[in-house]
Image: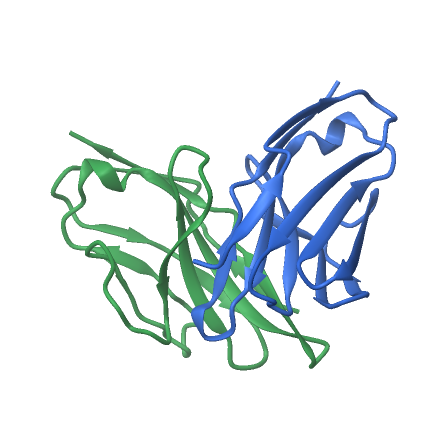
Amino acid sequence: AQRVTQPEKLLSVFKGAPVELKCNYSYSGSPELFWYVQYSRQRLQLLLRHISRESIKGFTADLNKGETSFHLKKPFAQEEDSAMYYCALSGLTGGSNYKLTFGKGTLLTVNP
Amino acid sequence: DAGITQSPRHKVTETGTPVTLRCHQTENHRYMYWYRQDPGHGLRLIHYSYGVKDTDKGEVSDGYSVSRSKTEDFLLTLESATSSQTSVYFCAIMQGGSGYTFGSGTRLTVV
C-alpha cells in the first residue's frame, strides 16, 4: 500500500520568513514524489517532482529515502505563495498499474 | 499541458438521481483517473483506467461507476446521488515522463 502523510493542516508564516511543508510517505518500492499547488480552488498545478530536481518559484524538495520524507522548502516566503499544497506519490499498484496517492494537504498562509 | 477538459463545470442535482461527469483528453494517454476533493480529506481516488475498458477501483469507489469505451473519454457516474457525494471532482491523466495533469474540476452539489 502507498500512503502520504502531511502532518500540518495549516501553516502560517510572515513574508520573508523561511517555510517548510512536511511530507512523509510509505511505499515498498521506489516511489516518484510530487508537490502540487492549488490556488483558490483552481486546478492542481505541478510544482515539483523529485526526479527533475528543479527549483520552481523558489521552492525545492529533496527526497530522503532513509527518513521517507519529501519536505518542501522555500527560504523567503512571499504573499503569493499562499495556497493549498499537496504532496503526492506515484507508485505501481499490484505490480502493474500506476496510481497517484495524495496527502491531505497543507494550507499555507503568508502574512504581510 | 495535454488537452484535458471536464464537463460540466458545475452541476446541482437532486438526491437519488443519476449523474454522469465527463473527462476528455486529446493526446491518447493510457492512464486516466477520477478524484474527489473534500476539506480535510485532500484528494481521494475514486476509480482509474489503464486502457479502453480497463478500469479499477480506488479508495472511495462505493456509489460510483466508470466507463471508458474509447481512449479519450473517461466517464464517472453517480448511480443514485447522495448528499455525501457533494464535492469537487477532478480528472487526471498520466503523461509518462511529464507526470500527471489535472482538469479544471467539476463542482457537484446534491440537494
Q: Which chain is green?
A: A
Picture coordinates of residue A83, whole percent (x, y):
35, 39
Count of numbered labels shown in the rendering: 0
Instruction: Name the tint of chain B in the rendering.
Output: blue
Where is B34 relative to A55, above or below? above
Picture coordinates of residue B98, whole percent (x, y):
44, 69
Residue drawn where x is 57% and y is 60% of the image = B93
Q: Is A98 situated left or right of B1 in this image?
A: right
Residue drawn where x is 14% and y is 49% of the image = A76
**Front in this rendered view, residue A27 or B103:** B103
**Front in this rendered view, residue A40 or B50:** B50
Residue at the left extreme, as displayed: A16
* Residue A81 placement: quadrant: top left
Q: Quadrant of the N terminus of chain B?
A: bottom left
Residue drawn where x is 71% and y is 40% of the image = B21
Q: Is A6 situated left or right of B50 in this image?
A: left
Where is B96 relative to B21, above or below? below
* Residue A68 placement: quadrant: bottom left
Residue drawn where x is 46% and y is 43% of the image = A43
Q: Is B86 situated left or right of B19 in this image?
A: left
Picture coordinates of residue A4, whole percent (x, y):
53, 60
